[in-house]
């Protein structure tokens, strides 16, 4: 087994999602995947706001229900002129 891309704790990181993929962190916050920096993933709320960083092992893809909720929140914010 190669030790390349394996963190010191021995736990492999999950595959990097495509930008814009909705993810859920350990606290239940849903955000769009924005990118990776220094081994952390950057997420941004779907309806706008400040990005936050998470450990890749502490997030999972959003469920269908979570995606619908986030997409509805984004559409509502856009209709109110809060985001472009």
Image: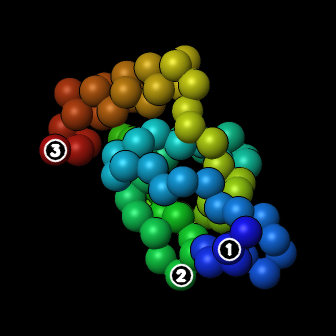
Which residue position is annotated with label 3?
84
Q: Is residue 10 left or right of residue 78?
A: right
Answer left or right for 43 relative to 10: left
In which quadrant of the rendered image does the C terminus lie? Answer: top left
Which is closer to the viewer, label 2 or label 3? 2
Helix, strand or loop for disc 2: loop
2 or 3: tag closer to the N-terminus: 2
For mark 1, what is the residue? 2
> In the figure, 24 relative to 57: above or below?
above
Label 1: state its secondary structure.
loop
How many residues crowd mark 3 within 10 Å: few (<14), some (14–19), many (20+)? few
Q: What is the quadrant of the N terminus in the image?
A: bottom right
Question: Dot 3: what SS?
Answer: loop
Estimate the spatial distance between the alpha carbons at disc 3 and disc 1, rounded to whole Å.
45 Å
Please name whichever residue, 17 or 58, is drawn nearer the observer in this view of the structure: 17
Q: Is residue 12 above or below residue 84?
A: below
Instruction: Give the mark toward the camera: 2 or 1.
Output: 1
Expressed as whole percent of the image width and height from the top left, the position of residue 10 reads: 81, 71
Q: Is residue 69 visible?
A: no
> Which picture quadrant has residue 24?
top right
Please tell me which residue is depicted at 22% across the width and 34% down the height of the picture: 78
Circles 3 and 1: CB distance less than 8 Å?
Answer: no
Local crowd size for mark 2, using a 10 Å CA cut-off: few (<14), some (14–19), many (≥20) = few
Disc on the earlier residue, 3 or 1? 1
Disc 2 from disc 1: Cα separation: 21 Å
- Tell whether 79 sits left or right of 2: left
User: Residue placed at 44% from the left, 20% from the top?
Assistant: 68
The percent coordinates of residue 72 (x first, y second) are: 37, 22
Q: Are marks 2 and 1 in contact (CB under 8 Å)?
A: no
Q: What residue is disc 2 on?
A: 38
Picture coordinates of residue 36, whole percent (x, y): 46, 69
């Amino acid at each position: 087994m190669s030790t390349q891309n394996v963190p010191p704790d021995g736990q492999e990181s999950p595959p990097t999602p495509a930008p814009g993929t909705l993810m859920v962190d350990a606290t239940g916050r849903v955000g769009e995947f924005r990118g990776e920096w220094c081994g952390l993933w950057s997420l941004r709320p779907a309806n706008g706001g400040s990005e936050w960083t998470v450990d890749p092992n502490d997030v999972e893809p959003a469920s269908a229900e979570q995606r619908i909720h986030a997409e509805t929140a984004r559409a509502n914010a856009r209709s109110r002129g809060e985001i472009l």
